[in-house]
Image (tube, rainbow, N blue to C red):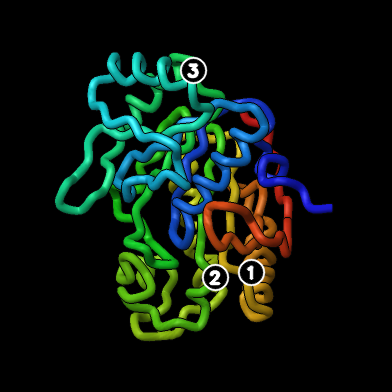
Amino acid sequence: MTNTLIDTLHLNSRGVISLIGAGGKTSLMFCLAKELAASGKTILTTTTTRIFMPNPDQSPVTIIEGAVDELVKKSKSFLSRYSHFSAGSKQDLATGKLKGFTPDIIHQLWQENLFDWILVEADGARQKPLKATASHEPVVPKTTSHLVLVTGLDAVGKTLDENHVHRAGLFSKNTGRSLGETIDVQSIATSIAIEIKKANALGHPLFNIVFLNKADTPGRIASGRKIAELLQTNKNINTIITASLRDESSVKNYFDIRKTNQRNKK
């Protein structure tokens, strides 16, 4: 019997989840929000960068408010009607994107004890399946309890360029794979190891999770398992999931769940 995402990602009580990487962060965020809300939890979905304005299927309502006091007041009112909603500081009318909050504001919201879970999209990838982060990225709140790095398995076999990798030059530098070469499982595993170590140092979450998404063909399933094997002994990773998340409604299958070091952090 397949566990729920809640069980698999160790979402047993309450906390702050930061999603980084590329290849399905937004879909995973709203999928998690639906599962958690269905389990009786109160949920806020937001970002420390920018996301497209949530549609009603993703979030029943979105608060746009830059002042923390007003945001808290509105959240208290909305929680009487909704177990899950989204929030941002402003909407960019030119792009339609929702601008989020700084990590400090996320921390303030968490300290208010309004929500069981705050889900934060903490990285931007321009809808590419892979990403290497610049020095100012990702934007992970220190209050993060669960860090989830998402990677799109559809990048395997593609050309290493800006069409498939956000900041392809950085990915090349980090992995030793030249621009124009084919992206392989080794380069993806190397990049994941670098990115998870970097993000872990920003917040020291209790759990670091790698979510290998788009495992919806035999070839991608095999690639996911190979990447998981390459990362199996990585001490910065608790859990590696190879799955197929087609939209924010559900995860279609868990093809491989691998648990590495169950670290006890204080």
Q: Residue 73 in the image: x percent, y percent?
A: 35, 14
Q: Which residue is mark 2?
A: 153
Q: Which residue is mark 1?
A: 224
Q: Tell me the element at label 3.
A: loop
Can you say whether 122 is above or below 126 in the image? above
Decide: marks 1, 2 in contact (CB < 8 A)? yes
Q: Residue at x 53, y 52 (%)?
A: 248
**Dot placed on the residue nearer the N-terminal end, 3 or 2:** 3
Task: Please tell me in which quadrant of the rendered image residue 7 appears.
Answer: top right
Q: Which residue is mark 3?
A: 80
Q: How many marks?
A: 3
- Which amino acid type is marked by label 2? Leu
The residue most toward the right is: 1
User: In this image, 238 relative to 125: left or right?
Assistant: right
Q: Residue 47 in the image: x percent, y percent?
A: 36, 40
Q: Nearer the viewer, residue 183 or 28?
A: 28
Q: Tell me the element at label 2.
A: helix
User: In this image, 128 relative to 232: left or right?
Assistant: left
- Which amino acid type is marked by label 1? Gly
Nearer the viewer's eye, disc 3 or disc 2? 3
